[in-house]
Amino acid sequence: MDESKALYFAGVDFGGTAAKIGVVDERGTLLRRSRLEIDPAQSYEEIFSAVSAQIQQMSEAEAVPLAAIGIGAPGFIDRREGRVLQGSENLPAFKERSLVTYLASAHDIPVFADNDGNCAAAGELKFGVGQEYSHFVMITLGAGVGGAIVIDGRVHRGSRGLAGELGHICLDPNGPWCSCGSRGCLEQYASAPAIVACYAQKRAKRSEAFRRDPQLLKLTPKEVFQRAGSGDVAAEEVIQETARRIAQAFGTLVNLMDIQACIIGGGVSAAGEELVEPVRRYLPDFAWPLPLSGVQVHAAGLQNDAGILGAAAQAWERLEG
Amino acid sequence: MDESKALYFAGVDFGGTAAKIGVVDERGTLLRRSRLEIDPAQSYEEIFSAVSAQIQQMSEAEAVPLAAIGIGAPGFIDRREGRVLQGSENLPAFKERSLVTYLASAHDIPVFADNDGNCAAAGELKFGVGQEYSHFVMITLGAGVGGAIVIDGRVHRGSRGLAGELGHICLDPNGPWCSCGSRGCLEQYASAPAIVACYAQKRAKRSEAFRRDPQLLKLTPKEVFQRAGSGDVAAEEVIQETARRIAQAFGTLVNLMDIQACIIGGGVSAAGEELVEPVRRYLPDFAWPLPLSGVQVHAAGLQNDAGILGAAAQAWERLEG
């Protein structure tokens, strides 16, 4: 590879109903982006031929050669073959298929697929607040809770590529049942639906009718944060409780991993300091002072296009070997 | 280094009141061992001149040249300088001193010091059941609970060498207060004193006098396991509860690290399958099925001389670079 040449990457971020696609340079500038709606009835070939066409168009329009393509998707993804092992319920065409073979063959460049939590951490490492650290953990708070652990400047993937399921560490063995079959997982306290449901429940307990208002369940976490800011005591309590659970998870990771930073990403992290400040405040309850010393707590640096940038970043990281 | 020559290491395992010292070959055979009582009033120089003399004697008696000296001690130990950062309350002379400088100067060979939990994992990796795995976690159950994480065939030390505090991950934020200042740490459920205290408490609740028998607090965990084997229901319950908490900690690590095995060491692990079997049985309650698939749960392979062998093993591991 000619060292003097700038590198460009395509990033593909698969969500439940759409793929976000973009072309990214080495500084994390998103040169071009698009969104492709996906129908769950579409076949593997239909989805990837459309994705491939978009990548081709963008790369030609920018007149940049791509060094690699990175793909991020939910679920457990086999690191070597890019095969979706589990968790592709929203995209049945991907079940047990490799996410890399079609594009690798169509574009004749390296293609790497990884879990979206790993991509988020790779994105922070290459382009976000993680650039300052070589050891950190990241959680992503959205419809579910994911995450990843970065060790010595690389995303830790474990023996088979399944590492980093931070959303499913058990914070309370008597806590609420989780979709994964365990109880008291972080996801049950800190996902967007959990935050909203907790708020609706608290309001119901404080209403004269003792009834849960179905309208409240349609709120976004952002609106719960806004209500807290406007003096809604129930909303403020929800944020404190959520922050305390996140701090418990981070405390476990501080004690286990001797990290330099804890990063909160995903849609919920748009709340910024409203969420980060109480996490930082509760963290000493759950970590040894010595490994905690110097540990920084941040909201993610990448927000709206974190998925595309993260997918591209993990491809870059893995291209480096 | 001449590749054809066999390597020999000295291992020094500092406990609260004694140092165990030995000379070990590459297969983990303990050629010679000794025990040196330590008085908390002794100075750093007094302790290490005695240790140094023992190492010298053993190496001469066996007529083997030592490749390195390994030291294991409780507490947080700075990886690079071997300095005791915290946790040397039983050996005040070590406070904030480097454990390697005296011996390195006296013997003119590499000396490496590490936390006893890290040494235990290094010992299993080089000489014990960990030889079969490149990714595993280990907990050591004794007066306290320690542990370590092995990644890609090396003990994970984190950004400053403080990683692996498995005894202090919070399993229940409303659990019993721990000496570390947190609540519900694994150590509060699975250390030797915790197991015995839990048994004494259960028996008190089941006695006519509703009184805790002080004699019961003098039992060893081994005796609690023996009572369980003889049909003592309270003892059996204690073992089930302890095993379930250990499984919770292991489940967290399975989800986080994508490991191949969980190893239980320390004095309590002498119970063998009596403890390991229920841990194995409870583990699926706390881990995703996919990362859990294929994960083995073992008692440690090294027992009585695990401390010396582990100290020697970590020196060997680090000599390799």
Image (cartoon, coloured by chain):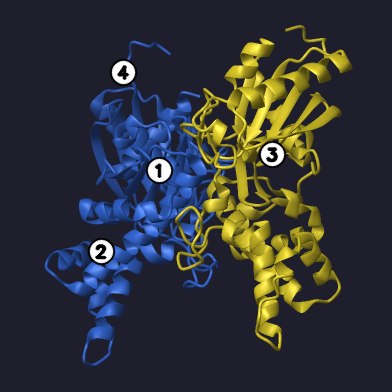
Chain colours: A blue, B yellow
Looking at the image, do the residues carrying marks 3 and 1 touch, with CB atoms under 8 Å apart?
Answer: no
Badge 4 and badge 2 in a common chain? yes
Identified by mark 2, the residue type is: Pro
Q: Nearer the viewer, residue B123 or B107?
A: B107
Of marks 3 and 2, the one in the foreground: 3
Of marks 2 and 1, the one in the foreground: 1
Mark 2: few, some, or many residues within 10 Å (few <14, many ≥20)? Answer: many
Q: Circle 1 sits in a helix, a strand or a loop, which is it?
A: helix
Q: Nearer the viewer, residue B87 or A164?
A: B87
* Residue assigned mark 2: A221
Q: Is residue B269 left or right of residue A54?
A: right
Q: Which mark is residue A292?
A: 1
For residue A123, which quarter of the picture?
top left
Q: Say which residue appears at 32% left-offset and 38% top-offset.
A: A309
Of marks 1 and 4, the one in the foreground: 1
Mark 4: few, some, or many residues within 10 Å (few <14, many ≥20)? Answer: few
